[in-house]
Image (spheres, coloured by chain):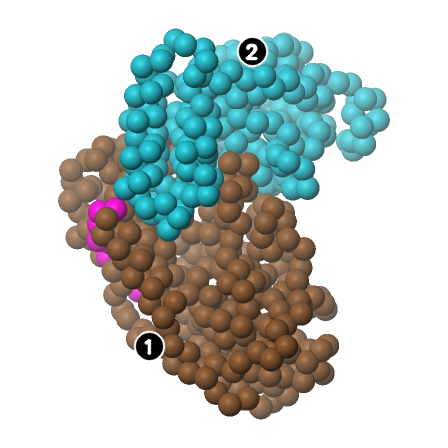
Amino acid sequence: MTWGIAGECGLRWVLDEQPSPAGTQRLISIKQLCRDLLADAWIDAVVGYTTLTVFIDFSVMPRSEALGLLSPLVGQLKSEAGQESVIATTKLPVVTLPTLYHPAVAADLAELADRKQLTVEEVVDLHSQRTYFAYANGFAPGFSYLGDVDPRIAIERLSTPRRQVPAGSVGIADRQTAVYPQASPGGWHIIGRCLTPLFDPQHTPPTLISVGQWVKFEAIDIDEFQRQGGDL
Amino acid sequence: MGLLASIQDGGRFGQLQYGVTQGGAMDGFAYRLGQRLVSNPANAAAIEIAMSGLHCRLIYDATIAVTGAPVSIEFDGHPQPMNSTLTAPRGANISISSAQKGLYSYLSVAGGIANPSVLGSRSTVLRDGIGSALSVGDSIPCGRPMANPKHYRYSPNQRGSKTICLRYLPGFQAPEMTPEFSAQFQNNHYLITAKRDRMGIRLSGNAHSTGISQLWSEATCFGAIQIPPDGQPIVLLADRQTMGGYPKIGAVLSVDCDRLCRAAVGTTVQFKAVDPTEGDRILWLASNYEQELRLAERGS
């Protein structure tokens, strides 16, 4: 792991390995340590696939002091590697997202099945039988990057992003899957719709899914979808 | 979505981890000056006017100030100066023209705009579904002003410039970029294009490849200079997406982002790398300059 500069108030740690749940847990551990050490100088910290970016108020704690406090963290984690106590393991419950997989709410479901030489039912099974790991939150409020999608249904982004995909759209891009919490432009293939609210600014934390949490999609039928208030 | 009036304050902080962007006034200096002219606390909300102009009627007596991009101001047809504390009676029609040059002007009101605060800020971010653009017929709530706000005037010392130099802190990916790209980047002259909004400003110039393909998505910071595969830099600003997968050569200092936001389309931009110690010094000086700024007091 190495670290460097990310703007006038940011420091960034980078894992020198491919993304993995274990790597993300290390980044979450560093995030928590940074939060404790920085106290009032802490602004924010964002976990990416292989990075942790910490935003610091250098007017509260001078840069040299912050660096002195934070730079030993990497070595500390390294020296105690393998000891479960340093690495935060998630105790958060698995999030279940009831999802309607139906062409009426999933513009790309039939096409994806066709291109992958699968039936729609097989695509649905492959997507809903896995439990996914939340690698990162970002792009939009409450949007969680989930992985890894079964390679048999992995598909590249649309060549031209849609101007608007409806809120709740469940998409696939490469081996990632996600739910669009709000209507927004989107370049992922849409295979379903989930009505569960993923972002509520009145709630703490405002996102339903935290980084490091595990997530399952549960296939529901049209009746259940409509009972939950869904429109076809 | 560039041309609108919206409510903005100093920005929303601590929420990037949830995918909620920073938001806040695009021209931080002009916004903060406005708050001082009406004796508001530093982070009070104001109305940011982006080229569109604004016409409103006061329901109560109010103390206001207009700062930022040059506009003409009238109270019931009578011209008023910019960068000054102004008092207007209830019923007055306030008319603010569209900006002749520059982009963002600020209407600050003593007591601040009192729309609901969401996640610690009153800033509107349309893309995040937080707040909405102001539209005809809206009634805008204001907070209670100080009993006797002082009257100030500020004489801006700004020259329009055809070239601006943006100082930036080289970031993590800078050393991984091809030597050709790194060598050219600070020599290049880029132009500000019309593709600009609250998310960022796209520049155009000689394109060079960074040699870095897409990255695993990671946090973006304010002022980040993102280099997409077409080699044309985009400077990410207040309403930027919180994560991105394009390489970034570094991040423009916030004081220089203010200047970038003020500059006209077609202005030439050059980049100059500074190290973190120098960057911290520049920011310290700018903040000191602002705090010590003498505002001339006027008789009310």
Quickly name the residue at label 1. B157
| Residue A145 point in image, percent of width and height | 52, 27
Closer to the observer: label 2 or label 1?
1
Q: In the rendered view, does B236 fall on the left or right side of B113?
A: left
Horizontally, is B224 left or right of B54 in the view? left
* Residue type for callout 1: Asn
The residue range painted magenta reads B267-276
Q: Colour of chain B?
A: brown
| Residue shown at the point (61%, 66%) measured from the top left | B112
Label 1: which secondary element: loop
Q: Residue at x 55, y 88 (%)?
A: B300
Observer-nearest of B290 and B183: B290
Q: Is residue A117 among the parts visible in the rendering?
A: yes
Question: Residue beneath label 2, please?
Answer: A117
Q: Residues within 10 Å of mark 2 (few under 14, many from 20)?
A: few
Q: Is residue B17 left or right of residue A195?
A: left
Circle 2 marks a residue in which chain?
A
